[in-house]
Amino acid sequence: MEEKHEKILKLIEDIDNKDFTFYFYTLDTKGNPTAAIANIYEHVKVLNDLGYKACILHDKNDYQGVGDWLGENYAALPHYSIEQQNLNLKAIDYLIVPEIFANVMEQVKQMPCKKIVFSQSYTYILELLKINERWDINYGFWDVITTSNKQATYIKELFPKIKTHIINPAIPKYFKPSSKIKKPIISILTRDQKQALSIVKSFYLRFPMYKWITFRELRGLPRKTFAETLGESCLAVWVDEISSFGTFPLEAIQSETPVIGKVPEMVPEWMEIEQDDKQIIKLRNNGIWTNSVLAIPSLIADYMKAWLDDSLTVAFLQAVRDSKDIYTKEKEDKAILDLYSKFVSDRKVEFETILKIEAEKTK
């Protein structure tokens, strides 16, 4: 009994000394840029800046990393390969797993550490989850970090007992308007690359008078090159029907580049005007939104005519500017500090409670 008491005291002391680690399980994208991976790295970077130990956890030694597209500051963050070492997590460590990896959650359910889901896409929640099994009851993941109120609500519908915590991703400051006049360039990003090509081909066939306009597919570009291209473009086109947050259009808005986009299945909060009647969805005028991908080529033509004639309405351009600076790094940093500090303080209380219970047993 005394030995157990000493072990618990040591754990509490280690918590006070920040002698524990946040492990963020991360998919190897083989060097392909994704907003979800960038967001995970941002959490790890901020936690390290705050004096915590946080690292990227990956399966293989040949993990390619993010240096080529996210930058050396992120590539230099601590990484831990499961293949290289046995994963031996302490009770005061934290394992954060993306929602798609229900198979990983099942494998680690007996580990004594604090286990947390990081859910950025509602689409992947059920992909590897076995029928009738739950993150919380079956795997011991009782907390989930997500990126929006809407996604948190959806998660609670699936797992009513789970605790949801919201940290909105920030739009980096290097997304900004070009210092020069916008060029007749249309930046396009779609989840399915074939869809981007289809939109471009349709546009050129239907509106050959605009064959001199350039489309740029932004997939795979380093983040800062991506931002520079978006900043100098006169228009952005976005199709991602299963998006949960909508990072790309926000990056375009931050660059003061208007967006033509297909409204996703889960309408982003920044796109929607809040209504008393929750069944009614009213969209903001901060982009040109459509429910049909087939309508996009003609919407591009209408926009380009107005842009070339300098007849875009002041109200529309102002609505785009009014949606800037909603998701700043300062807000994200504070949210990360507040949430992870709470995880740590709550964990300390858990062990202090255990200590009191053990002390009562000895009386």
Image (tube, rainbow, N blue to C red):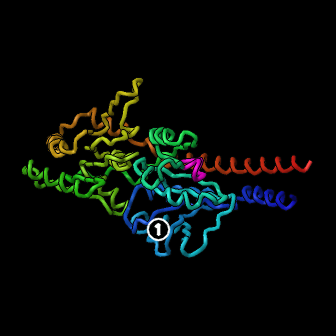
Image mark count: 1
- Considering only vertical position in the picture, is 275 above or below 255? above
The N terminus appears in which quarter of the rendering? bottom right
Considering every residue shown, the one lying at the far left of the view is 209
Considering every residue shown, the one lying at the far front of the view is 132
Q: Residue at x 46, y 40 (%)?
A: 154
**Magenta residues (range):** 135-144
Residue 65: x percent and y percent?
A: 45, 68
- Residue 16 visible to the viewer: yes
Residue 145: x percent and y percent?
A: 53, 48
Residue 46: x percent and y percent?
A: 55, 56
Dot 1 alpha-carbon crowd within 10 angstroms: few under 14, some 14 to 19, many 20 or more: few
User: Which one is nearer the viewer's eye here, 334 or 134?
Assistant: 134
Is 255 on the left or on the right of 74, as rendered? left
Considering every residue shown, the one lying at the far right of the view is 363
Residue 130: x percent and y percent?
A: 48, 53
User: Which one is nearer the viewer's eye here, 78 or 241?
Assistant: 241
User: Which one is nearer the viewer's eye here, 362 or 307?
Assistant: 362
Q: Quadrant of residue 259?
A: top left
Q: Residue at x 73, y 50 (%)?
A: 348
Residue 121 magenta: no
Q: Amino acid at mark 1?
A: Glu
Q: What element does badge 1 sit on?
A: helix
- Considering only vertical position in the picture, is 172 above or below 150? below
Q: Residue at x 67, y 58 (%)?
A: 112
Q: Badge 1 is on which residue?
A: 72
- Considering only vertical position in the picture, is 277 above or below 234? above
- Residue 255 visible to the viewer: no
Residue 136 magenta: yes
